[in-house]
């Protein structure tokens, strides 16, 4: 941690609002002996004050990744930019990472793992999310021509949720095929259907008069596939999306206001009303889930339910290891299992070991966040995990599995009422919890035996 800093004073000046925070350090002397400030790390937050405070918890500092630990030892000051919503903080964070290339962000993981939003170069552009490796492959294969690229976005699951919000405000095309019988602008600026369609080949889907793609039917495609939107109108929609991902909210609102007036003047009141609704949504985005781990995203939806379970193994405190196992949609997901060698000299203190494991896990923003954390042990273990989550601004529920003298499950400590608010049956959830816990115990013992064989 950087020396001679009044951390409490720094934190007290931070607002309890969404935004982006920047850790700044001083670069080496350049020409003329001048030192310049450089950005070491950029992050986003639901609460700037709570998020920055979490960096200075002693246990967290001891178990941060080397890059974050290095950043904490070098920073001189912290700056912040408030945003009106977490969604805007997510977009601003990506823009600043791209512009400033802070070492602790860029080197935190392979660039090919970052996520990007791309807009294709077509008459009716598609809006897609792609990983860095997919971008490289598309360039090599020349199968997608990209006109705009936004990112990098460190967390794929958060970007996925963000795109759902963006698409509700600005419906776009992603997969459907454009209609062969589109609207064209009339002399007064209003769209009309082309009357002479003899030059267009027949459409197997009845484009121009069919129901269109699934997203069209639920209002997330503006009608590119049904011919309900002209190329000019769609280009304006794409421009709105570009302005949003450029963090140019002021110009975006100005554009939307002009479009609303134009539609009203042309007596296209339904379209004007849609833009009015978009303007309202833009000013009242309910997106707390983007950072607080998607608690409000149907956290107990039976269709997409992820459980992470943790356990430790050791022999009288030696070769202590920990593991994370995953059960997703009622099935084990071994590709997401993770192993941890305990760094903290905790002896036989399982609680400190568990706290270290979870703290290190939370550093990995690229890993999907679960809907439920499961820990092996009693109330003490459960409270230890909840403390780490609370210090990191995570509100995901936690349960613990209590074992008997034969190490068989005896009881599950959980707030059943809170867990079942989305209608998931306890018997079903209990089976998934016990499965994940059993896998964690098996995996931890296997990892521990593997290490012991090496010595």
Image (cartoon, rainbow, N blue to C red):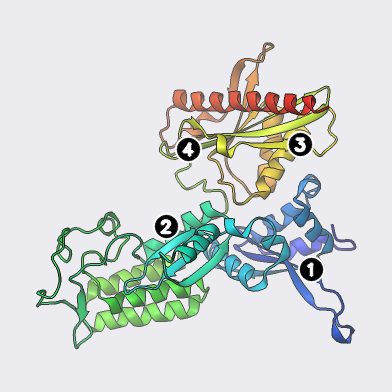
Q: Position of residue 185 (x, y in %)?
A: 22, 82
237 or 106, which lies in front? 106
Q: Measuring 64% from the left and 56% from the top, which residue is drawn there? A: 110
| Between discs 4 and 3, the one toward the N terminus | 4
Q: Measuring 90% from the left and 63% from the top, which residue is drawn there? A: 4
* Residue where numbered disc 1 is placed: 77
Q: Which element carries disc 4, helix, strand or loop? A: loop
- Badge 1 crowding class, 10 Å Cα cut-off, few under 14, some 14 to 19, many 20 or more, is some
Relative placement, left or right, of 201 versus 89 is: left
Q: Is residue 204 visible?
A: yes
Q: Are marks 3 and 2 in contact (CB under 8 Å)?
A: no
| Between discs 4 and 2, the one toward the N terminus | 2
Q: Which mark is residue 164?
A: 2
* Residue where numbered disc 3 is placed: 341
Q: Which element carries disc 2, helix, strand or loop? A: helix
Q: Quadrant of the C terminus?
A: top right
- Badge 2 crowding class, 10 Å Cα cut-off, few under 14, some 14 to 19, many 20 or more, is few
382, above or below 227, in the image? above
| Between discs 3 and 2, the one toward the N terminus | 2
| Between discs 1 and 2, the one toward the N terminus | 1
């Amino acid at each position: 941690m950087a020396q001679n800093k009044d951390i409490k004073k720094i934190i007290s000046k931070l607002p309890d609002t969404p935004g982006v925070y920047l850790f700044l350090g001083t670069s080496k002397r350049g020409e003329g002996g001048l030192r310049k400030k450089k950005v070491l790390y950029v992050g986003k937050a639901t609460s700037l004050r709570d998020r920055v405070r979490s960096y200075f918890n002693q246990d967290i500092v001891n178990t941060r990744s080397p890059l974050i630990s290095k950043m904490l030892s070098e920073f001189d000051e912290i700056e912040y930019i408030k945003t009106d919503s977490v969604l805007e903080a997510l977009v601003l964070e990506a823009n600043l990472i791209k512009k400033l290339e802070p070492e602790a962000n860029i080197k935190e993981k392979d660039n090919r793992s970052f996520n990007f939003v791309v807009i294709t170069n077509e008459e009716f552009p598609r809006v897609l999310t792609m990983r860095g490796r997919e971008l490289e492959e598309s360039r090599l294969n020349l199968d997608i021509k990209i006109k705009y690229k936004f990112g990098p976005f460190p967390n794929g699951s958060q970007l996925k949720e963000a795109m759902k919000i963006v698409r509700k405000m600005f419906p776009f095309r992603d997969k459907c095929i454009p209609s062969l019988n589109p609207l064209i602008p009339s002399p007064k600026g209003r769209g009309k259907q082309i009357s002479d369609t003899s030059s267009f080949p027949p459409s197997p889907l009845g484009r121009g008069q069919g129901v269109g793609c699934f997203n069209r039917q639920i209002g997330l495609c503006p009608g590119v596939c049904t011919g309900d939107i002209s190329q000019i109108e769609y280009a304006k929609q794409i421009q709105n999306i570009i302005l949003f991902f450029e963090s140019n909210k002021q110009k975006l609102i100005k554009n939307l206001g002009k479009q609303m007036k134009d539609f009203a003047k042309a007596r296209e009141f339904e379209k004007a009303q849609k833009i009015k609704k978009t303007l309202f949504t833009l000013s009242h985005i309910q997106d707390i889930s983007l950072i607080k781990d998607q608690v409000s995203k149907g956290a107990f939806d039976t269709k997409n339910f992820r459980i992470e379970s943790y356990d430790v193994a050791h022999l009288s405190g030696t070769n202590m290891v920990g593991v994370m196992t995953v059960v997703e949609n009622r099935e084990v997901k071994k590709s997401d299992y993770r192993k941890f060698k305990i760094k903290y000299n905790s002896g036989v203190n399982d609680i400190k070991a568990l706290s270290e494991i979870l703290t290190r896990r939370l550093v990995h923003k690229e890993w999907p966040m679960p809907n439920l954390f499961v820990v092996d042990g009693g109330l003490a273990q459960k409270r230890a995990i909840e403390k780490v989550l609370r210090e990191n601004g995570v509100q995901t529920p936690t349960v613990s599995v209590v074992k008997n003298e034969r190490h068989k499950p005896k009881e599950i400590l959980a707030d059943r009422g809170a867990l079942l608010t989305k209608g998931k049956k306890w018997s079903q959830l209990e089976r998934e919890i016990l499965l994940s816990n059993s896998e964690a115990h098996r995996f931890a013992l296997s990892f521990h035996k593997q290490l012991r064989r090496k010595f």
